[in-house]
Every structure is written in C-alpha cells, then in structure tokens.
Image: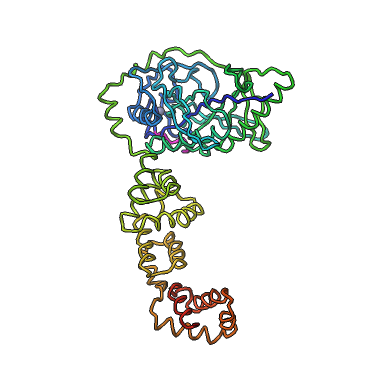
C-alpha cells in the first residue's frame, strides 16, 4: 500500500538572554558545573521565581518573526513530573495560555514549490538541570549540573503539515534563519541550543485521518532529523504491511547504527496553573515597540540586494542567508568594492578560510574594512588574484593592514610593460620549442609561456599584460 507520512515537529530553542528565566544567574550552561546557581534555580523550598523581562522580549521577537499572534494574556503552568534533573517535581511551562499562536514559515518542497508550514503555538518554558553520567572506580554514578536549570527556552510546536524528511529539514532551516536574524538565539543543534523532537505517523495516501504517532528524539544535527524521519517512515510502513499496530511511544535516534530504538511509553504528566508567577499581560504599546525592533528580514534583503547591487537571485539569497554575513557583505561594499567581487571573494575565499580556522564571520580577525582594502587593491590591479589569496591568509595571523603586508612581502603586481617585456624576452629565449608549437597552431603553448613568465616573476606579474605582450611578440 502507498503511505503518506504525517509529521509534526516540536522544537526547543534556548534563548540567549543574559540571565536565566526566573533569577539573576548568568545564562551560560557551558561553564564549570554548578557555578551559576542560586536558591531560585536550585528550586529550594520557598524560593519565589522572578520572571525576566529580557526573556519575554526575546521570546516575543522570535514568535513575531514566525508570524505568530502574540496572546495578550499568557501564563505559566506547572508541568508535573519527577526526575533527578528536576527536584522540585515540576517544570514551569506554558500549556493553557501560551505566549503566541497561529504562526507559519514558508519552505520550498522537493519540486521547488513554496509551501507554508503552520505553527500551532510558541510557548516559554524553563530548562531542567543536566545529568552527567560517569564511572567512579567501577561504579556508574550520575551527577547533577544545575547551570542549565531555569535557563530560558521557547518551544515551537508545528501543525502536522510536514510530509517528507526534506520538508522537515527545510522547516528547521527556515525557522533557524528567522530566529537568528532577530537575535533571540543561536539555534545550533550541534551545540544543543536547538533540540528537535519529531512526531511521525503514516496513513494510506489520499486519506485525511490521523493515526497513532511515534515520537523520535535525540537527533543532534538537521541531517540526523532527515535520516531519523526517513528511517521511521520505512519502519512504520514495514510494521503496517506486516499487520502490526503502531503504539504511542518514544524512540531514540541512534546516529551510529542509523536506526530508531524504542525508549519508553510516552508519559504526559498533568499541567496545572502555577500560582507563583503572575499572569503576563501584554499591552498594545509594548507590542508595537517589539514590532518596531524587527530587523529587515531575509526575503526583504534578497529583493534589495537584487535591486541595489544587481546580484543574481542565487547570490542574493546566499548573501542574505545569515544576518552576520549580510552585514559583513554590505560593509565591504560601502568601502567601494564592486558587489560581484565582494560576493565572489567572500564565498570562495573568506568563508572557507573561516571554516578552516573555526571562526565565525561576526568575530573574524579579518574584519570587513581590512577585507575591503585587500579587494580594492585587487580591483585596482595593485596585486593579482594569486597574491590576494596569499595576503588574505597572512591577514588572519597579523595585525598589519593589507597595504603593509603587500609592502613587507613584496606582493605588488608588476604591470610596468618595459620591465615585463624584458622578462618575456628571456622566457622566449629559453623556450624556442614552445614558440614553434604556438606558430604551428598549438594554442596550449601560449598558456605554457604565460605560466613560465609568471613563474619567472615569482607570481607578481600582471597575467593579463603578460598575455597581451606575448601575443604581440609571437605574431
Ligand atoms: Zn539562579
């Protein structure tokens, strides 16, 4: 039988606020264990949570860029369960009155068609502590790190609109781009600031009922999400074809074996309104202020880049894909570099160099001003492309300006025709066979002679001028 998958994603995103959600402890889960703690986030009896305004702002901005309606009244509930990473016995979350509802993001499906994935709701939730499992002597032990306890999350719950692993991956990428743009979170699955759970069920193609779903957790990259969903669709189809019923349960993705493994029956504890955090009332005026803070979003930027800088669509989309990247690109252009030169050199030289060094573009040691200075010397024929690549790699390890590096290491391009003519005469004298080949119609011989001249100049000759002089002399 032909099946269709019905997929909904629940995505937890850790907000990058300065403090935790209900206390003044720093929101830095990577610090040494149990450094960022206080009676409130240790959940000691009697501690009163104090809701952070910054968290509300970051959560609201994220919900707005996901096209959600912000709810004027929202409130926290106690999601009850008992586990060593949650000694108070409940997590503060929003269930009955979430922050925001009815959003959407747009994706491109496999056929290149635009499709809207609806978002059911976005709500705020405190994170729990982290269990660390170790071996002491021969004893397995579990330790609790409370740095993460009480750090702010938003949970984004999609409608079951996703049909394929591809759509799921596109949805996560679109959501990540939007939230990063507004600056509310880093959204890195690898670093655990974005965690994705997938609910998957199958139904005969063409039907519109919903069948029992299975929840899959533990994917730590967008690719893993695609693979886990693809595997789960295959597994459930096999079950159904064999006459086996699907039961509601949770499975873990095993990235080594590339399969999902049954974990436990799905437990949903009760959610009861929390009496300690006052209801949040959002005024029209405050919401207007939040909306005025929204930056230019990627789709608007693509249009502007195509109009203002005459970039082709694919280049405009690429340069708009991350806010840090587009800011860098525009700063380079403002220094007077041609847009296409900037795109080409950022995409083919700068980004790979940053990747090799594990640097982010926002805090790259080669800032946009130095990079622009280098590109301008290339555009003005002061240096050639080969030298520009070498200067770039030196820029990463030095404080010098491109100008200083070029002077120190003698990268200045030789464009002086008298000097180049003398050099080319020497090359011709040493290569009579290549001249012969060229005159007999072997085009390759010209390339060889240009190469020899470049080598003799130690890479500093202007290759265009070398070529012109050679053609003239070989006539
Ligand atoms: Zn605290």
Which of the pair 96/388 is nearer the observer?
Answer: 388
Determine the residue located farthest toward the right in the rendered image: 242
Which of the pair 344/213 is nearer the observer?
Answer: 344
User: Where are the magenta residues, as a range?
Assistant: 26-30
Percent across and percent down for residue 237 are 68, 25
- Which of the 4 quarters of the picture holds residue 379? bottom left
Name the dominant secondary structure of the magenta segment: loop
Question: Taking 404 as reference, is 134 above or below it?
Answer: above
Which of the pair 12/423 is nearer the observer?
Answer: 423
The N terminus sits in image quarter = top right
Q: Is residue 28 magenta?
A: yes
Q: How many marks?
A: 0
Question: Taking 2 as reference, is 79 above or below it?
Answer: above
Query: If the picture is divided into quarters, which one holds ligand 1?
Result: top left
Q: Is residue 62 magenta?
A: no
Determine the residue located farthest toward the bottom in the rendered image: 429
Residue occupying the point 39% across, 65% down:
378
437 horizontally vs 119: left or right: right
The colour scheme of the drawn protein is rainbow
209 horizontally vs 371: left or right: right
Question: Taking 39 as reference, is 451 above or below it?
Answer: below
251 horizontally vs 317: left or right: right
Residue occupying the point 49% across, 54% down:
352
- Which of the 4 quarters of the picture holds residue 408? bottom left
Percent across and percent down for residue 388 are 43, 65
Percent across and percent down for residue 116 are 46, 29
């Amino acid at each position: 039988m032909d099946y269709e998958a019905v997929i909904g994603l629940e995505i937890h995103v850790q907000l990058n606020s300065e403090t935790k959600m209900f206390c003044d402890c720093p929101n830095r889960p990577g610090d040494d264990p149990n450094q960022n703690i206080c009676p409130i986030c240790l959940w000691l009896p009697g501690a009163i949570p104090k809701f952070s305004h910054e968290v509300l702002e970051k959560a609201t901005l994220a919900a707005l860029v996901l096209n959600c309606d912000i709810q004027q009244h929202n409130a926290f509930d106690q999601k009850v369960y008992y586990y060593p990473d949650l000694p108070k016995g409940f997590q503060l979350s929003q269930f009955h009155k979430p922050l925001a509802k009815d959003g959407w993001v747009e994706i491109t499906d496999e056929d290149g068609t635009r499709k809207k994935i609806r978002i059911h709701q976005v709500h705020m939730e405190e994170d729990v502590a982290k269990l660390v499992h170790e071996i002491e002597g021969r004893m397995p032990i579990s330790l609790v790190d409370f740095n993460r306890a009480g750090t702010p999350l938003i949970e984004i719950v999609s409608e079951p609109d996703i049909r394929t692993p591809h759509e799921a991956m596109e949805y996560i990428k679109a959501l990540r781009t939007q939230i990063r743009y507004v600056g509310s979170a880093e959204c890195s699955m690898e670093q655990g600031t974005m965690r994705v759970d997938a609910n998957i069920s199958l139904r005969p193609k063409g039907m519109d009922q919903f069948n029992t779903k299975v929840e899959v957790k533990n994917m730590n990259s967008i690719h893993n999400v695609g693979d886990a969903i693809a595997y789960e669709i295959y597994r459930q189809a096999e079950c159904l074809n064999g006459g086996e019923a699907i039961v509601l349960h949770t499975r873990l993705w095993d990235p080594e074996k590339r399969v999902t493994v049954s974990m436990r029956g799905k437990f949903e504890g009760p959610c009861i309104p929390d009496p300690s955090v006052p209801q949040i009332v959002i005024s029209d005026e405050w919401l207007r202020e939040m909306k005025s803070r929204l930056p230019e979003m990627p789709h608007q930027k693509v249009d502007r880049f195509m109009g203002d800088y005459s970039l082709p669509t694919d280049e405009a989309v690429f340069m708009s894909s991350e806010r840090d990247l587009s800011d860098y690109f525009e700063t380079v252009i403002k220094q007077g570099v041609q847009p296409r030169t900037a795109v080409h050199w950022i995409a083919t030289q700068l980004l790979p160099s940053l990747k090799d060094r594990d640097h982010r573009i926002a805090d790259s040691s080669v800032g946009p001003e130095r990079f622009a200075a280098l590109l301008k010397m290339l555009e003005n024929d002061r240096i050639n492309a080969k030298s520009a690549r070498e200067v770039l790699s030196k820029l990463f390890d030095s404080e010098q300006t491109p100008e200083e590096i070029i002077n120190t290491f003698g990268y200045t391009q030789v464009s002086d025709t008298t000097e180049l003519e003398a050099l080319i005469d020497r090359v011709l004298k040493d290569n009579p066979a290549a001249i012969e080949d060229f005159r007999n119609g072997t085009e390759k011989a010209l390339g060889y002679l240009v190469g020899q001249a470049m080598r003799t100049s130690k890479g500093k000759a202007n290759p265009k001028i070398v070529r012109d002089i050679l053609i003239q002399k070989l006539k």
